[in-house]
Structures are given as structure tokens and as C-alpha cells.
Amino acid sequence: MALDTIIEIKNASLFQDEQLILSDVNFTIERGEFVYIIGKVGTGKSSLIKTITGEIELTEGEGIVADFNLKGIKPKQIPFLRRKIGTVFQDFQLLSDRSIYDNLLFVLKATGWKSKTEIEQRIKDALDKVGLPNKEHKMPHQLSGGEQQRIVIARALLNDPEIILADEPTGNLDPETSEEIMRLLHDISLTGRAVVMATHNYALLKKYPGRTLKCEKGKVIEVEQMTEIDFESLME
């Protein structure tokens, strides 16, 4: 794997419940790259993301993610792999019964942090990075959708990951707020982290161009250029 390559998948076949989802998968992603994954529902986008995070076992082919070998990775290694990956969800998945601080605290404790001083600094730094430095005592329902998604991105940054996986992160947001989230994710990629984003939004893909991987007919294909008509026909 090249020095700046953070994800490398070679000659892989991806299965879910013994059903072949994607075959002959070959691609690499470098540090600092912004990469889109597109394709209609059921074409394998989620399976691809779950393979990268170790949720789906890679049984055929090769896969290296943040220096972890996906082929035969031991269960006890998977939490360490996931510390290298920050995940941003469409539906936020914030714990509604606790404050923003306690949401972020929960993640840090779950990933082994014990020092109160270090925990407080991590939370402060993450909130600063997403432009919400004074929201730690708010409850999720007191924040707008865009602010909640920024908190989700802060949560993804807590362990200083090398990769951000964003699964339809703008799906529940209005166009203006979606653009704010896109600018934030692009800024994160400029810090040297790879950002991999699944999306159905052509307008954002056009305005914020990046490498595009298309899941279609059991394959993963790199797309050089795509018109809106091409994109819409792909998503139908």
C-alpha cells in the first residue's frame, strides 16, 4: 500500500448473508481525498461502507484500511480499526435523553478514555472544529437539524480519525444547511483525513466535486464525468 493510501480494496467480492453483493471490487483512497459513493438503493453502497468498518467480513480479495488488514481481522481488533474511522449518519443517532456533552462523553468512555482533563479537552476541541463551541450543555432537541449534524461530525472527530465515512449526511437537511455541512466536510478533508460520502444529491456533487465511485450491477466503477440526466437515471 502506498504511503498516502488509507483505503485499498483489491479483487474483492463482498457478501451479505452469503449473498454476493459486489464483485471484482478494486479501488484506493488517499489521505485528504474527498470521495463520493453513489448508486440506487440496494446496489451495495451500505455493504461497501460496512466492509470498510469491519461490520461485514471480507472473505474474498484483499482490503487494507488504516493499516488494518480486513481479511481475517480478529474481533478484538475491530474496535481499534473503528477508532480510525469517524461515522456521520443521516438520522444523527444522538441520544435524546442526555446533553451534547454527555453524548460526546459516552463515545469517549466507550473507546477507552479515562482522564477527565483529556476528555474535556477532546470535547472542547471537537465542538470548536464544527463551530459550536458553547453548545455542550444543550439537549439535542434544542438544536436545529444543521446544528445536530454538526454535533454528529464533532462526535466523529473525537478520536482524531484518519477516515470520515458520511452516509447521506445531508439527507434530512434543507439546501442551505446541506451546503454548510458540505463545506465543513470539505474543510475536514483539507486536514489530511479521507472523507467518503454516500449521497443521492447531484447538486451537492456538482458544486463540491470529488472522485466518484458508482455502485451498479454488482460492480464498483469510477466515474469521470456525470451529467444530471446520467445521475438521475442511475438513481431511479
Image: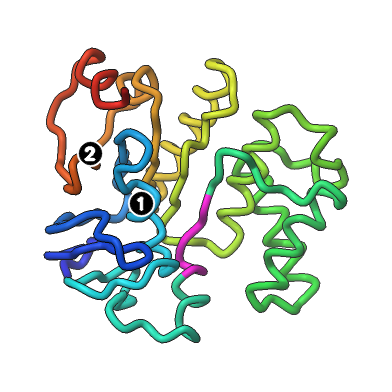
Quadrant of the frame with the C terminus: top left
The stretch in magenta equals 82-87
Q: Which residue appears farthest toward the top when viewing the image? A: 229
Q: How far from the left and from the top, in percent, is residue 48? A: 33, 55
Q: Is residue 51 above or below residue 233?
A: below
**Identity of the residue drawn at 15% across and 41% down:** 222
Residue drawn at the location 52% of the way across and 61% of the way down: 160
Determine which residue is flagged by label 2: 214
Q: Where is 18 relative to 28, above or below?
A: below
Label disc, if present, on residue 194 of the rendered structure? 1
Location of residue 3 in the rendering, given as x and y in whole percent from the top left corner: 20, 67
Instruction: Specify which label sits upstream in the sequence, 2 or 1.
Output: 1
* 8 sits left or right of 111 in the view: left
Q: Nearer the viewer, residue 93 or 4?
A: 93
- What residue sits 20% from the left and 19% below the top? 230
- Give the residue type at disc 1: Ala
Residue displayed at 31% across by 75% down: 70
